[in-house]
Every structure is written in C-alpha cells, then in structure tokens.
Amino acid sequence: MSSMTRAMEGTRDWLISQSGIKWGTGAALPLNKDNCFLAHMAIPQKITGQFAICIDDAGVESGNMNNFYDREMYSINIGIWRRVGRVPKDRMAQQMIIDNEIYSSLAQTLADNERELKMALHCNTEVPVWLNSKYALPDEDEFLDRFIQYWVYRGRSGNEVHVIDDSGHRIFGRVMKFDGLTVIKESMQLYRKAAL
C-alpha cells in the first residue's frame, strides 16, 4: 500500500474513530463508512444520508533532504457535502439556483462542519501517531517510512452545487485543503550506491 493511500484511508478511519467527539463550537459529526469515504475530486457520486465527508488525493511534494533521503509531503482535499434536494429533469439548467433562505441555512451548517474538521485535523499530533500505529510503521527510533508531521489546514473552495445522479439529486458543499503530513523515504541515490 502506498504512503498516500495510507494517508487518505488512515485519515478517513481516524475521523470515523473520532465520531461524536465535539472538537469546535459546532455539532459533533456522526461519522461512519457510509458518510465518510474516499471519492474522486472529493465529490460523492451518491449520498445515502443527509451529508457526506469525502477525501481525495491532492498531490505530493518532494523535498530532497540530501543524496540519500527524500521528504514526501502529502496533500488531501476533504469535501463536506449536504443533500439539497432534487431537481426535475426538465429544470436541470436551473440546478445552481438555491432559494436564499435554504442557501443561508446550508452555508451556516457547512461552516460548523468545516470548523469541526479543521479543529479535528489541523496540527493535531495525534493523527500521525495513530496512522503509524494503525499501519504498524517503524517506531520513533527509525525515521524512515513513517509519518512524521501532521495535517495543516490551507483553506477551502467556495460553495459549490453539483447534481450527483440522473434523478437530479443535488448536493451543496465546499472542499477543504490539508497538507503537511510527511514521510521520509530512502532516495534512489541510496539504492544506486548499494548496487555498486
């Protein structure tokens, strides 16, 4: 399993393990595998309940520490989505229009959910420790191939509306960006030297 897959799946599992814990001023998020999952572009293809939290790969940055070790810093997007309602097929062109009162209510709910996720993940040193334990990665004496940093919140998208299926179900949400979770890996230079 790649380190990025561990980062995404492990973060999902950690969030689910924290279900019901109140991190900020909003309501605690009741998370499980039906409403917290990996999804392309952090946008769900369907929502079985009233909301979903979706996680996706947002890239990797590599910083060469020296000739023998590479630092890989992971980025993820986390989408927070609420079910809005259905749009009849003959009105699909109006899919982006949401009543102002409903819009205001949804925006406030998303702001509360966003704050909970930010408080749960941003600079939380428990997350990399939990990930290292979950995947039985090397202990602190071995600095290679283990998570050594934590997620840092970097901002979010504006509010978005998407139609997610042929029957016209809409979701309203935003995508948060986190990066900073880091793994140190042996570089190819070290393998080349060992082969000589």
Image: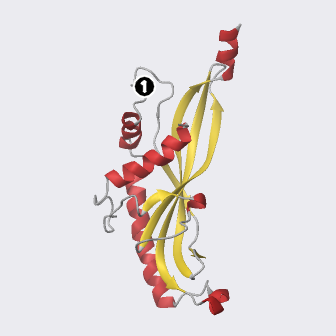
Callout 1 secondary element: loop
Q: Residue furthest left?
A: 21
Neighbour tally class for label 1: few under 14, some 14-19, many 20 plus, Cα within 10 Å: some
Image location of residue 44, percent across then percent down: 53, 66
Question: Exactly how many numbered labels are in the figure?
Answer: 1
Quadrant in the picture for the C terminus: top right
* As drawn, 41 above or below 126: below
Image point 39% across, 25% down: which residue?
139
Using the rendered view, name the quadrant where residue 164 is placed.
bottom right
Q: Residue furthest top?
A: 196
Answer with left or right where residue 194 lies relative to residue 54.
right
* As drawn, 39 above or below 130: below
Image location of residue 121, percent across then percent down: 41, 51
* As drawn, 161 above or below 45: below
Image location of residue 117, percent across then percent down: 41, 59
Q: Is residue 122 visible?
A: no
Q: Is residue 165 visible?
A: yes
Using the rendered view, name the quadrant where residue 160 is placed.
bottom right
User: What kind of colouring is applied to the model shown?
Assistant: secondary structure
Image point 47% across, 24% down: which residue?
143
Image point 48% across, 70% down: which residue?
81
* As drawn, 60 above or below 26: above
Front-most of residues 168 and 83:
168
Question: Which residue in the protein does label 1 denote?
Answer: 138
Image point 67% across, 87% down: which residue?
93
Say what amino acid the circle numbered 1 marks. Answer: Pro
Q: Residue furthest bottom?
A: 90
